[in-house]
């Protein structure tokens, strides 16, 4: 709980998880924000002195508020928030485990619950099980929920999920169609505040990945540069390694001269973000 009259439950174990994921000690996380004892209080007893401190802790961890707080006794929201967080951290199997607490889809109470559930299921199939056909089924389920309604971030991410799924199936014509559709939808999405920031970075990553598979390397370079600036300006490490990795790979495709330096930066950031698979992949690319 917090002392500002806000009825939320702090998930101390999630704060500890993200802190360790970032390779931070309690004292490092607390630096300039609060005391180490306060961080210990958050992690062990799910308490924080004020919402202001909690906001600053969340910002330093580079996550969203919904990753570490939840309404009391709402197990559905806890499961969905954790599953969404796992997908953002590129951990599809962890996301699948988080969804196991839901006995079936009847546990989902709102349209937003269904949007998030189908989106996560789609990403689990796409990046976890490598089954793009199954992923397409779930992403289309997300989009069916928007019939007659304005799009939101999950509509954009579902469309981009379709783009990536069709790219995996070598259907690049459909990939380009869905990338164009996502860019159009994105113009009408409300995109203010920290809550949207990580989603904005994730959307930009999906766009860049799809464009890379389409061979639009110059456009990917421009978009990764914009995404890197957005992350750095907001002191976010989230996906910074992935953007630098895409940048390095584009430079190789464009036969640029400074590719080794670009790979070195990407590998360093992958290590900081504990993204060992990406670091190993980049090392192998340099050696080849």
Image (spheres, grey):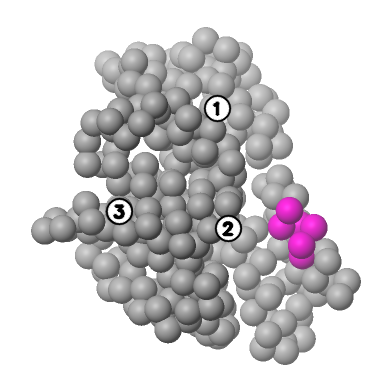
Looking at the image, residue 86 sits to the left or right of residue 78; the answer is right
Q: Is residue 170 magenta?
A: no
Q: Nearer the viewer, residue 165 or 214?
A: 165
Above or below 128: residue 39 = above
Prevalent SS, magenta region = helix
Badge 1 marks a residue whose secondary structure is helix
Instruction: Say which of marks 3 and 1 sits in front.
Output: 3
Q: Is residue 77 visible?
A: no
In the picture provided, is 219 more to the left or to the right than 182? right
Q: Position of residue 45 (x, y in %)?
A: 52, 10
Residue 247 visible in the current orientation: yes
Range covered by the magenta-colored residues: 277-282
- Residue occupied by mark 1: 15
Report, in whole angstroms, how far the alpha carbon at label 1 lies from the one at label 2. 30 Å
Lower sequence index among marks 3 and 2: 2
Q: Position of residue 112 (x, y in %)?
A: 26, 41
* Rendered view: 159 above or below 250: above
Callout 2 secondary element: loop
Q: Report the residue marked by disc 2.
A: 130
What is the distance, in whole Å, between disc 3 and disc 2 at their CAs?
18 Å
Label 1, residues with CA under 10 Å away: few <14, some 14-19, many ≥20: many
Q: Which mark is residue 141?
A: 3
Closer to the camera: disc 1 or disc 2? Answer: 2
* Of residues 97 and 247, the one drawn nearer to the viewer in this rendering: 97
Q: Which mark is residue 37?
A: none
């Amino acid at each position: 709980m917090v002392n500002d009259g806000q009825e939320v439950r702090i998930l101390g174990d999630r704060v500890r998880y993200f802190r360790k994921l970032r390779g931070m000690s309690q004292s490092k996380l607390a630096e300039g924000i609060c005391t180490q004892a306060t961080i210990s209080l958050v992690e062990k007893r799910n308490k924080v002195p004020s919402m202001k401190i909690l906001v600053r802790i969340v910002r330093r961890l580079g996550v969203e508020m919904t990753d570490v707080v939840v309404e009391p006794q709402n197990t559905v929201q806890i499961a969905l928030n954790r599953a969404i967080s796992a997908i953002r951290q590129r951990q599809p199997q962890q996301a699948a485990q988080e969804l196991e607490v839901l006995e079936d889809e009847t546990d989902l109470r709102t349209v937003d619950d269904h949007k998030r559930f189908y989106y996560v299921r789609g990403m689990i199939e796409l990046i976890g099980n490598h089954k793009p056909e199954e992923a397409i089924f779930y992403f289309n389920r997300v989009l069916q929920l928007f019939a007659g309604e304005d799009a939101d971030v999950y509509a954009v991410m579902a469309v981009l999920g379709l783009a990536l799924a069709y790219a995996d199936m070598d259907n690049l014509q459909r990939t380009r169609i869905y990338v164009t559709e996502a860019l159009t939808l994105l113009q009408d999405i409300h995109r203010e505040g920290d809550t949207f920031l990580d989603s904005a970075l994730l959307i930009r990553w999906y766009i860049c990945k799809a464009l890379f598979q389409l061979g639009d390397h110059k456009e990917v370079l421009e978009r990764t540069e914009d995404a890197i600036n957005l992350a750095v300006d907001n002191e976010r490490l989230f996906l910074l390694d992935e953007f630098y990795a895409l940048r390095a790979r584009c430079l190789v495709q464009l036969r640029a001269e400074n590719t080794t330096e670009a790979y070195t930066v990407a590998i360093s950031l992958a290590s900081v973000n504990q993204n060992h698979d990406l670091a190993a992949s980049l090392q192998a690319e340099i050696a080849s």
